[in-house]
Amino acid sequence: MVRWNKRTIHRVIEHMTNRVAQVSPRVPLHCGIVLLAIAIGGAGALAGPPERADSIDKLMTTLHERGQFNGAILVAEQGNVLYKKGFGMRKLKIMEHISLDGVIEVGIPGDGGDFPYGDWTAPYRTPEGFAKVAAMYGERFDLLIGRRTYDQWSGFWPKAPRSPMAERLNAATKYVVTHRPESLEWGPVECVGPDFLEGVRAIKEKDGADLIVSGSSSLTSALLEHGLADELVLLVDPVLLGKGKRLFAEGTPPRAFTLKSTEAMPSGIVIQTYKAAGPLQNLR
């Protein structure tokens, strides 16, 4: 543990912030955990001008987005944590096919459901689109899914024709929200646990690949409400359905997002990628 007084911390933050723009994105600056322990009274780096905390955050966010920093910043005073943020945590990305009116439910033959439209996404699925989705998933990822989605996928992907996507899905760790963990057979698999929110937080803090949530509308509201989703990728199909489970049901908590990208596919699907931006900014 390194003990610095407030003035030293302020000077280090200013120096690092001023220099960060000069750091080449090619320089590997990977770190573990940075500890700033304040030896004297006061709130240290968080005292006085509030931009001190912002400086730490902006600096490490910039380096992390460049792939140059993975770790955490911890500012403490006499054992009391004043500021803590992890920059190497696993990202959680929600990815869904969605209709123009917000429906994500898809009928599966033999599942006993009453959804009348079957797989309405099928006419818009193309090899080009499949390759695009596979690229967005990435070469390595883990899954966070509900039990119904797990049961549907476990009946298809282990027996699917060999392909990079099938191999990646079968190799991914499936974190499943279920009350019947003893019947999970498609592995590698882990039960999230009885406390869903704490379970997801613990998973995000573990070393590993980023997490993909797909086909599990029941999880989405809770993930968004508690700030656990980092990105939202909507594959908007050019259809209106009028009924079915919606990604954002009545009562979904208000949240703000920043548009990262949008891309129109030849099939008519529009891929919209958003980054979580915190609570809704009410302008009234």
Image (cartoon, rainbow, N blue to C red):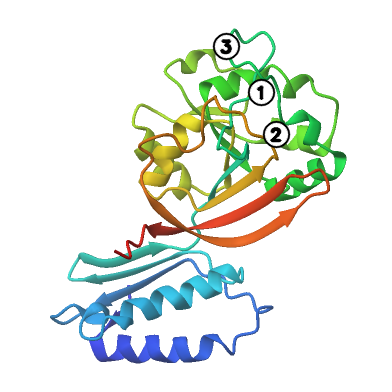
Q: Label 3 vs label 2: CA separation? A: 28 Å
Residue kind at label 3, given as amino acid type? Asp
Q: Which mark is residue 114?
A: 3
Q: Position of residue 177 (x, y in %)?
A: 46, 27
Q: Quadrant of residue 122?
A: top right
Which mark is first along the chain, 2 or 1? 1
User: Which residue is denoted by mark 1 in the rendering?
Assistant: 153
- In the rendered view of the protein, which quadrant contains the C terminus? bottom left
Which residue is found at the position 69% from the left and 12% from the top?
109
Q: Which mark is residue 169?
A: 2
Q: Position of residue 256 (x, y in %)?
A: 43, 57
Which residue is found at the position 78% from the left and 19% from the top?
159
Cβ–Cβ below 8 Å for labels 1 and 2?
yes
Left or right? Give the position of 82 relative to 55: left
**On screen, 63 above or below 172?**
below
Nearest to the observer: residue 157 or residue 220: 220
Which residue is found at the position 47% from the left and 73% from the top?
60
Which mark is nearer the camera, 1 or 3?
3
Structural crowding at the residue carrying mark 3, measured as other residues with C-alpha within 10 Å and reported as few (<14), some (14–19) or many (≥20): few
Q: Which mark is residue 264?
A: none
In this view, the residue farthest toward the left is 41
Residue kind at label 1, given as amino acid type? Trp
